[in-house]
Image (cartoon, rainbow, N blue to C red):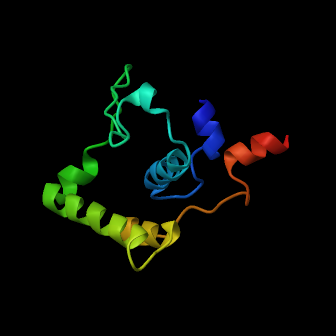
Amino acid sequence: ACVFHFLGGFPDQCLMEDYELVSLLRRRSALFTPPLSEFGNATNKEKLAIILGPPALCSPRRWQKFGVLFVTFMNSRLVNLYAGGMKLGPDDLFRLYYDREPPTRLSECSPWELDMVD
């Protein structure tokens, strides 16, 4: 929870928020270099960690409707458009993915920023 709050919580965007959170984690972790005695050699920076608890679930509807190849291709394409050369924003990607306008925001502040103001 401390790291999550240190990063500012989930980015308040309608798509690619998970990609952005991982990117923030990687950039912040690059600033912190743990002592060699703590993690062995310096080349082993990322490790697989199993988080106990209930599994994360996702709806199969999109996969069932469009098929595995198309959904995998579209997901890869959207990540490349977001992080690659075109640098499309989350709202643009939302329009491509859902073929409709992104949801309207009630505030310019994200939900966790509203909590800090109160």
Q: Could you say which is closer to the camera, residue 11 or residue 36?
A: 36
Residue 99 seen in the figure: no
Q: Is residue 77 above or below residue 23?
A: below
Residue 75, x across and y down, in percent: 29, 61
In this rendering, is residue 8 above or below 75? above
Give left or right: position of 83 versus 91: left
Residue pictured at 45% horizontal, 66% vertical: 94
Q: Residue at x 77, y 46 (%)?
A: 114
Residue 81 rendering spot, x and y as whole percentages: 37, 73
Residue 113 seen by the camera: yes
Would you identify the image quadrant in which residue 66 lies?
A: bottom left
Q: What is the quadrant of the N terminus in the image? A: top right
Could you tell me residue 25's position as x and y percent? 50, 46
Q: Position of residue 95 (x, y in %)?
A: 44, 71
Outermost residue on the right side: it is: 118
Q: How many marks?
A: 0
Q: Nearer the viewer, residue 59 or 72?
A: 72
Q: In which quarter of the view is residue 53 placed?
A: top left
The answer to whether 96 is drawn above or below residue 118 in the figure is below
Residue sitting farthest toward the bottom: 86
Query: In percent of the image, x 47 and y 54: which residue is there?
Result: 23
The quadrant the C terminus occupies is top right
Specify the quadrant of the image occupied by residue 98: bottom left
Judged left or right of residue 37, residue 111 is right
Q: Residue furthest top?
A: 53
- Residue 49 as seen in the image, left or right of residue 15: left
Residue drawn at the location 64% of the way across and 38% of the way down: 5
